[in-house]
Image (spheres, rainbow, N blue to C red):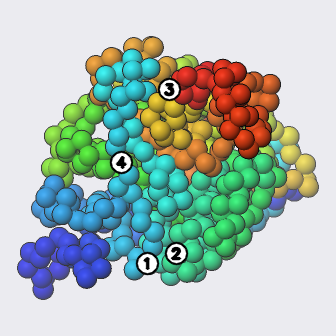
Amino acid sequence: MSGVRIPPVLRTATGGQKQIEVDGSTVGELIDGLVAAYPALAGQLLASSGDLNPFVNVFLNETDIRHLDERATAVQPSDTLIILPAMAGGSRPQADG
Amino acid sequence: MTSETIAPPATEVTTDDRPRLSHETTRGLRCRNCGREEALGPSYVCPACFGPLEVTYDYEAIRARISPDTITARPPGIWRYLELLPVEAPPPRGLAVGSSPLLPGARIGRELGLEHLWLKDDTRNPTLSFKDRVVAVATARALTFGFDTLACASTGNLAGATAAAAAAVGLRAFVFVPADLEPAKVSHALAYGATVVRIDGTYDELNRLCLEVADEENWAFVNVNLRPFYAEGSKTLGLEIAEQLGWRLPDVVVVPVASGALLTKVAKAFEELALVGLIEPRPVRFVGAQAAGCSPVATAFARGSDEIAPVRNPDTIVKSLAIGSPADGRYALDIARRTGGSVEAVEDATTAGWIRRLAATEGIFTETAGGVTLGAVDAARRRGIIGPDDEVVALLTGNGLKTPDARLFGLDANGSSAAQTGLTPPIRPSLDAFEEWLSSGAWSREPVGGLA
């Protein structure tokens, strides 16, 4: 299990929890596991294509996953995944243009 | 408008000469992605889609209440545009921000092949950069929201601006900066009594940290939880440019791009001025300026891509623009493309050369971002984005005293003569010794800063 840190704007969907333990060996599996446990997060975290919402940034410990292997990045149980708003832009093209 | 009032004046000049709104012209916050409306508050993220929030206004009400005459009659400073800012009134105490001069850049313009170049000289705000504008607006809101601590994630200029603004209104300040920040900027923030939190990492890493800290501490992070208000302060540069040109717009504006917010907000200012009837709308090309060593937006522009690939390790002397993952990069890129402008990447040696040329031809010593901006004017001019007859406004957003050694980048200052650097060796304090040195001819007849 790895920890996923939840920002305040998403805590309504997680019953107020700030950190959630999720099973998975990659970043993608952790995100999918999180959304499976808390389906209300899907609309906020994922675009209609299933990719990450362009306004979401994900960090593995202190590193932006865009500098790693994105969703395919391997995760250890001691790792923490941090979800944060991409402030105003983010870097991924919006799925719906 | 409330029912008990009948068409009061939009503003009234108080005994301390500060304009005040008789009515709130700010409507609320709206998600730039999905359009969801939110109440005014210290929030910056849409709870529905994670998109960024921005301030909305009642433009019809503003249109009915302001005119060029009402604004012209007000005291100098950013608060003369109060209706287009998300505050009800300026704070009772604060710094004198804005109304920086728009200067004709005839001599530097000739070097750039431009007949009509204007220099928006924002090097002379209270803490010597345009960041005083955004911080003033955020601080006004921080006081309204009841915060006791001001904070920021800074590439340097914002640290000093936040520290000074906090001191002026009596708030505590924590400013987060990269540990390798220029010493002058660290000293500047310390001088105002701020706690300078040095982070051993890039701006993007400390920005990520500040997002987390903002969630845990009840602090007013001017560029995090107050970002929708903070960013609106950048509009005042655009508002001033239009007013100083006689309530009209130029052909081209050249803007340094770090987060990209400044470029987007100058564009928003021009749109709003037309919406409220203060100017006639006309197309303006926007040219963005980035340092080649950290140019994610310029790279996306050059590739024709919508995707802004983050730069993990910026490598440039232009630390004030060294944001590898620019928050508003997507919007700045879109505006540059949509308006027929461009986003240019400028090498550090070129930046240093333009810092020297500007100082030697116009008497303005700009921080590194200003050198990048002039380098971008040159690049866009050479590529035909800017024509020789275009009226161009270049934004000089920070003072060279913040980065005093940057102008020497690419020069061998120690190995060069006074003819190249302007600096003589030590001379004995006697007239004979001076005359002897002068007759040696080891000095330049032209302003030495102009030498590349």
Q: Residues within 10 Å of mark 2 (few under 14, many from 20)?
A: few
Q: Are marks 4 and 3 in contact (CB under 8 Å)?
A: no
Q: Position of residue B201 (x, y in %)?
A: 79, 49
Q: Earlier in the sequence, mark 1 or mark 3?
A: 1
Q: Position of residue B266 (x, y in %)?
A: 37, 44
Q: Are marks 1 and 4 in contact (CB under 8 Å)?
A: no
| Residue pointed to by mark 4 | B101
C-alpha span from label 2 to label 3: 36 Å
Q: What amino acid does circle 3 point to?
A: Ala
| Residue pointed to by mark 2 | B168
Task: Tell me whether marks 1 and 4 sit on the same chain.
Answer: yes
Q: Earlier in the sequence, mark 2 or mark 3?
A: 2
Q: Residue at x 16, y 40 (%)?
A: B280
C-alpha span from label 1 to label 4: 23 Å
Q: Are marks 2 and 1 in contact (CB under 8 Å)?
A: yes
Return the chain for callout 2.
B
Element at badge 4? loop
**Taking B433 as reference, is B59 left or right?**
left
Q: Which mark is on residue B28?
A: none
Q: Nearer the viewer, residue B92 or B230?
A: B92
Return the chain for callout 1.
B
Return the chain for callout 3.
B
Q: Residues within 10 Å of mark 3 (few under 14, many from 20)?
A: many
Q: Residue at x 42, y 61 (%)?
A: B97
**Taking B275 as reference, is B140 left or right?**
right
| Residue pointed to by mark 3 | B376
Q: Are marks 2 and 4 in contact (CB under 8 Å)?
A: no
Q: Earlier in the sequence, mark 4 or mark 3?
A: 4
Q: Nearer the viewer, residue B234 or B219?
A: B234
